[in-house]
Amino acid sequence: MTIRADRVRHWVRSLLLLCLWWSVVGCTAIPAPPPGIAVSVDRVISGQTVIVRGVPTDPTAAFTIRLQGIHAPDLQQVPWGEAARQALETKLRSTPTITLVLASAEPDAYDRYWGDLWQADKWINQWLVAQGHVLVPLVPHPSPQAQQLSHAQDYARMRGAGLWHPDTPLRQTPAEFRRGES
């Protein structure tokens, strides 16, 4: 009997938090996509990395893009890594051209460019977080974009979406998994 009461309290509390979250987020203007580069997705590597083509300086060249502000589960973190990759691939497949907003004009040590992807007015980085496919790293002094990602993570967590599902939660961050921590 107490287990049922606890579940009811949990769901009521979750519903109240969701309503509170929607009241705050619902009053916020939907951000317009910033100016960027129209590109096409060649291939989705993981839940946070894609290969694009169509960059004006070299339209046929392939560029690796690492989505900034998120951490996708490693592909060996079954089932979450592959679920994140498939979700990103399915989402991007619905539109032939997306907008890439680069964080830096220079690649990192792995020859990846960091940035954000937009599909019309939908920020893909944030969409992945809100669907519960990826994590948001803790940032000591968050930017407005990092705060939006954090709010999206709270939303996914409250709903128990994806890697936040109470029956099958992600137990290690991608970094912990790669280090072999238990």
Image: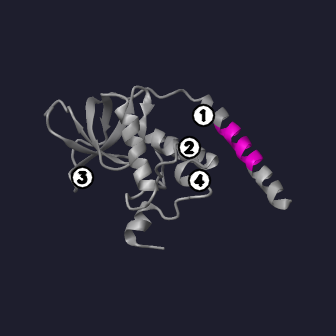
- Amino acid residing under circle 1: Val
Give the spatial CA distance, label 1 vs label 2.
Answer: 9 Å
Residue occupied by mark 3: 108
Of mark 2 and mark 3, the one earlier in the sequence is 3
Q: Is residue 77 above or below residue 50?
A: below
- Between residues 140 and 4, which one lies in front from this camera angle? 4
- Amino acid residing under circle 3: Asp
- Amino acid residing under circle 4: His
Residue neighbourhood size for the residue with mark 2, other residues' Cα within 10 Å, grouped as few (<14), some (14–19), many (≥20): some
* Residue 135 shows up from this direction: yes
Q: Position of residue 18 (x, y in %)?
A: 67, 40
Q: Position of residue 53 (x, y in %)?
A: 21, 35
Q: Is residue 28 above or below residue 141?
A: above
Name the colour scheme: one colour
Residue occupied by mark 1: 25
- Point out the frontmost of discs 3 and 4: 4
Q: Which residue in the rendered view is the most extreme toward the right?
A: 1
Q: Which residues are magenta?
A: 11-21
Give the spatial CA distance, label 3 vs label 4.
Answer: 33 Å
Residue visible at 84% across and 60% down in the picture: 2
Q: Is residue 46 above or below residue 39?
A: below
**Overall secondary structure of the magenta section:** helix
Image disc number at residue 165 = 4
Of mark 1 and mark 2, the one earlier in the sequence is 1
Dot 3: element: loop
Residue neighbourhood size for the residue with mark 1, other residues' Cα within 10 Å, grouped as few (<14), some (14–19), many (≥20): some
Give the spatial CA distance, label 4 vs label 1.
Answer: 22 Å
Of mark 4 and mark 2, the one earlier in the sequence is 2
Query: Is 116 inside the magenta-drawn segment?
Result: no
Q: Position of residue 77 (x, y in %)?
A: 43, 61
